């Protein structure tokens, strides 16, 4: 299953109907919103005597308002009731909303149009928590990153397609009639697609409903803060929407005043950004190795800053044409660099956002998952409002649009650095991911034998100083490694090992207090349902062979009986991090490294002799095969 493409999910009932439902909903949202913005901007007198700019901003506020007011209730409903039924109700309501929207369009009735817009925001508010909370129930952990990538890809493709469709339809003769017909038909298709979504049981059926949105939102944020990584992931997602809102809101004026382009150039910029996000989202599965790889988050944030800065320098100081179309713009000097920067900003945004959503889904308690996502939606809305306010303030202060985009890139670097200092796990996983994807050619076999939840003791041979990094890169779950205390306390490295939550250990004669403390910490970690990895040889191999296992493992299992997962590493003996005396002669620049994981063994059967034999057989089978099956 792990090596299959994520696209197969589109043909499976547990994902395909849901994907189609959310795709059609996102498309319909954008057809209506952008049609309304175009009509208000270019035909305002038909609808109202108010200033078009005021109406545009009011429309944006009306759509966001439900996220602030009702997200807390939406999260509670998504946790309390069966999710496929909730989706069908939401899609049925969408049909009624589009009837109201169509009536407003045909009657040129602004209050009806704004009512429909508010209800569409309400529709999105209630769909959001279900959208992300249903995925962990429908997909396996190995499929979660691919499923999220498809959802993000579909969302941004729908945004682009909806925006383009609105522009084309409104420009037609009787364009309002075409828009009215399309949004109604698409809403009906979305409802029909939702009928095929399989049931997803309630996560917290006994939940007592709290009608106070402020109290409930605060309660959900307090719950999320219990897991620092989850809470900072919420802030990281909200920051992405701040970043995205800052860029997308500037595209019209950036195109017209800075690039000298017309509305087709605006569409081109949106297309480049959206296609970039879609591409990055889809690439996440391949780059992550079918697991929630949060090491991609720093990689994404680096790209978001680097290419925002490059966009500033790529932006021309003056333009040769005004009112240029998309192709005329692309023929200008430096235009392709601008286009490439926007595409890459979107792509690295995909690398950034998909793992964060997947991390929240996997590390948040299922009983609170929807409510935490709902709280995240409120944070997203607030960050987008702050982005709009900051943009207005700095532009009024005399900053140019390219300078504003440069400021956004610099702020992104500062925010990312702050988060990674607070939660070093992100940065450590990034370093680990870079190491494995640049120096080692890692292949794995039997990774599915490592349990997705619950405690287990991982037992592996010890070939090099990089063993822990390779194992970490291959495993979906965080692992607590037991390591020699003298290495743990090396100046400059202690911070890294402490951030990894490694457990220092020593010999009974060398430092008995360290040894006892290690056994206590190992027992506590296993009792808490964590994975603990030990190298029972107690030292790096001196000859490439697997040495005898020390009895400390038996004491661990006597105190905390948990399943034992045997593993074997091969290929690292020829690396520069081993104790191979001939390593400088035999080491290869990009060594092929294998990790083979065997089936779990009960604690009663996990004797030293039995485990040593299993690990030797795993290593031998890998050596004979020459590669991972």
Image (cartoon, rainbow, N blue to C red):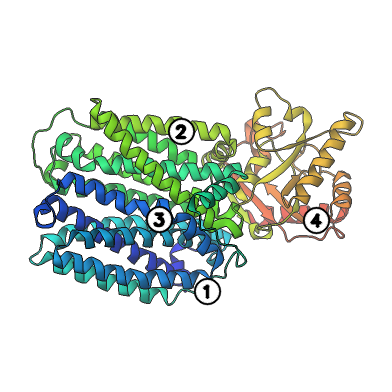
Q: CA distance from mark 1 to mark 3?
A: 22 Å
Name the residue at 25% across, 40% down.
250
Q: Secondary structure at mark 4?
A: loop
Asked which secondary structure carries label 3, the reply is helix
- Ranked by sequence position, the earlier of labels 3 and 4 is 3
Name the secondary structure under disc 2.
helix
Asked whether the viewer can see residue 356, the reply is yes
Foreground residue, 157 or 175? 175
Kindly identify which residue carries mark 3: 152
Secondary structure of the residue carrying numbered label 1: loop
In the rendered image, the quadrant that contains the N terminus is: bottom right
Quote the CA–CA distance across marks 1 and 2.
Answer: 39 Å
- The residue located at (11%, 50%) in the rendering is 49
**Residue 299, horizontal then vertical, whole percent:** 46, 39
Checking the image for residue 199, the label placed there is 1
Q: Which residue is mark 2?
A: 415
Taking the spot 51% from the left edge, 31% from the top edge, the residue there is: 418
Q: Which residue is mark 4?
A: 562
User: In the rendered structure, which disc, 1 or 3, sits on the residue that comes first in sequence?
Assistant: 3
Position of 188 with respect to 442 (left or right) is: left
- Measured Cα–Cα span from mark 3 to mark 4: 38 Å
Q: Which image quarter: residue 36?
A: bottom left
Marks 1 and 4 sit apart, C-alpha to C-alpha, by 34 Å
Q: Residues within 10 Å of mark 2 (few under 14, many from 20)?
A: some
Q: How far across and down, in percent of the image, does residue 81 sit?
A: 54, 69
**In the foreground, 616 or 124:** 124
Alpha carbon distance from label 3 to label 2: 23 Å
């Amino acid at each position: 299953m792990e090596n299959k493409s994520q696209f197969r999910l589109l043909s499976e009932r547990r994902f395909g109907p849901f994907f189609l439902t959310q795709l059609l909903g996102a498309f319909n949202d954008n057809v209506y919103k952008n049609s309304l913005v175009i009509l208000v901007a270019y035909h305002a007198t038909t609808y109202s005597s108010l200033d078009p700019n005021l109406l545009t901003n009011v429309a944006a506020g009306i759509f966001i308002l439900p996220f602030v007011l009702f997200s807390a209730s939406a999260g509670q409903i998504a946790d309390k009731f069966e999710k496929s039924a909730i989706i069908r109700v939401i899609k049925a309501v969408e049909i009624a909303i589009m009837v109201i929207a169509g009536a407003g369009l045909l009657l040129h009735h602004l209050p009806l149009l704004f009512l429909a817009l508010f209800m569409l925001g309400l529709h999105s508010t209630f769909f959001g928590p279900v959208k992300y909370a249903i995925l962990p129930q429908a997909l396996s952990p190995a499929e979660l990153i691919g499923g999220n990538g498809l959802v993000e890809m579909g969302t941004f493709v729908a945004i682009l397609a909806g925006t383009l469709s609105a522009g084309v339809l409104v420009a037609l003769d009787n364009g309002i009639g075409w828009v009215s017909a399309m949004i109604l038909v698409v809403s009906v298709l979305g409802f029909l697609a939702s009928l095929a979504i399989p049931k997803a049981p309630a996560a917290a059926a006994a939940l007592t409903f709290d009608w106070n949105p402020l109290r409930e939102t605060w309660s959900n944020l307090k719950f999320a803060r219990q897991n620092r990584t989850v809470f900072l992931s919420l802030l990281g997602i909200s920051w992405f929407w701040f970043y995205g809102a800052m860029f997308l809101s500037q595209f019209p004026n950036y195109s017209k005043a800075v690039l000298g382009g017309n509305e087709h150039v605006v569409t081109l910029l949106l297309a480049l950004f959206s296609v970039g996000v879609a591409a990055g989202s889809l690439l996440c599965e391949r780059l992550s190795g079918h697991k929630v790889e949060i090491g991609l988050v720093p990689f994404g944030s680096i790209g978001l800053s680097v290419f925002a800065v490059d966009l500033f320098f790529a932006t021309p100081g003056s333009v040769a044409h005004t009112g240029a179309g998309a192709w005329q713009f692309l023929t200008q000097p430096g235009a392709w660099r601008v286009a490439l920067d926007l595409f890459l900003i979107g792509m690295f945004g995909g690398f950034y956002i998909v793992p964060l959503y997947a991390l929240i889904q996997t590390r948040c308690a299922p009983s609170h998952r929807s409510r935490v996502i709902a709280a995240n939606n409120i944070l997203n809305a607030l960050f987008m409002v702050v982005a709009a306010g900051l943009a207005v303030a700095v532009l009024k202060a005399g900053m140019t649009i390219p300078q504003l985009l440069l400021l956004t890139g610099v702020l992104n670097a500062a925010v990312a650095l702050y988060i990674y200092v607070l939660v070093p796990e992100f940065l450590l996983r990034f370093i680990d991911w870079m190491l494995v994807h640049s120096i080692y050619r890692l292949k794995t076999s039997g990774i599915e034998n490592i349990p997705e939840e619950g405690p287990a003791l991982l037992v592996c041979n010890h070939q090099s100083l990089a063993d822990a990094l390779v194992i970490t890169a291959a495993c979906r779950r965080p692992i607590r490694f037991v390591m020699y205390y003298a290495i743990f306390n090396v100046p400059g490295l202690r911070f890294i090992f402490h951030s990894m939550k490694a457990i220092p250990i020593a010999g009974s004669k060398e430092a008995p207090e360290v040894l006892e403390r290690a056994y206590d910490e190992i027992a506590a970690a296993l009792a808490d349902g964590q994975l603990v990895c030990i190298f029972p040889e107690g030292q790096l191999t001196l000859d490439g062979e697997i040495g005898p296992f020390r009895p400390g493992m038996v004491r661990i299992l006597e105190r905390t009986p948990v399943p034992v997962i045997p593993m074997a590493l091969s290929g690292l003996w020829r690396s520069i991090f081993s104790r191979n005396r001939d390593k400088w002669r035999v080491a290869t620049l990009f060594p092929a490294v294998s990790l083979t994981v065997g089936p779990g063994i009960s604690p009663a059967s996990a004797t030293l002799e039995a485990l040593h034999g299993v690990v030797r057989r795993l290593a031998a089978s890998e050596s004979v095969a020459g590669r991972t099956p």
